[in-house]
Image: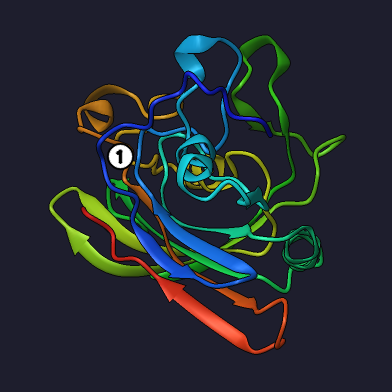
Amino acid sequence: MTVSSAYTPPMDPLDILHHDAQLLVVNKPHGLLSVPGRGEHLADSLLTRLKAVFPEALLVHRLDRDTSGVMAFGVTPYAQRHLSMQFEKRTAKKAYVARLDGLLEPRTGTVDLPLIVDWPNRPRQMVCHETGKEAVTYWRVMKYETAATRVRLTPKTGRTHQLRVHMLSLGHAILGDPLYAEGAAMNHPRMMLHAEELRIKHPDSGVSMKFRAKASF
């Protein structure tokens, strides 16, 4: 992706977790697109900011704009292909932290509900047993709070808005979610969803590596 020479990266420093000849791992802030959207007003993104400093950075996967957390980028085309294959084959392991509206019970469980885009209301997604794609999420309660639950979410699949729709299906929207939360659950400064941990194999050595970034909420 070519970055316009007119682009000036913001003063906010990049939170680099790891950088070597093949791999770049970053902690994405919430409210920032993973890649540029259409139009000048959507030009700012994590990839754009990275390319201003690391022109060789190549996209591997994405996080929603309102989700913060660990993202990995390739530094060479070989690394990009290698890492992308790990996500495609589901050998890359991701873990998220979220705060949910209400008290989720039981303390552990699985959501296995197929998802598809809700075309009249896109970008919203919805459960569809007829034409939806497989989507599986494991959850574990970390802590009960006053009228909220802190959970660890481990997705088996990586569908668009999967964690957000799956938690909503349990009756517990993610706090601050601008698309799926309602009422008081929307009254938060950000969406309370953070990609806390990513496990991948290094493209060169094949050694398993774990990257973590603690949630700010």
Q: Which quadrant, please, contains the N terminus?
A: top right
Q: Position of residue 205 (x, y in %)?
A: 70, 88
Q: Is residue 73 left or right of residue 167?
A: right
Q: Residues within 10 Å of mark 1 (few under 14, many from 20)?
A: many
Q: Position of residue 128 (x, y in %)?
A: 76, 34
Residue at the image position 25 percent from the left and 36 percent from the top: 11
- Residue at image position (12%, 52%) is 146
Residue in the foreground of this view, choosing between 51 and 17: 51
Residue at left offset 35%, top offset 68%: 141
Find the residue positioned furthest to the front. Answer: 5
Q: Is residue 57 above or below residue 84?
A: above
What is the x, y in percent for residue 72?
56, 60
Q: Residue at x 64, y 39 (%)?
A: 160
Instruction: Identify the image quadrant of residue 29.
Output: top left
Residue 152 seen anywhere in this rendered image of the structure? yes
Q: Which residue is mark 1?
A: 175
Q: Nearer the viewer, residue 60 or 149?
A: 60
Relative to 144, is 109 on the left or the right?
right
Residue 75, placed above or below residue 184: below
**Mark 1 element type:** loop
125 horizontally vs 20: left or right: right
How many numbered marks have been drawn onto this rendered protein structure?
1
The part of the image, by quadrant, that contains residue 181 is: top left
Which residue reaches farthest left? 146
Above/below status of 186 relative to 102? above
Is residue 57 placed above or below 24 in the rendered structure?
above
- Whether residue 106 is visible to the viewer of this picture, yes or no, is no
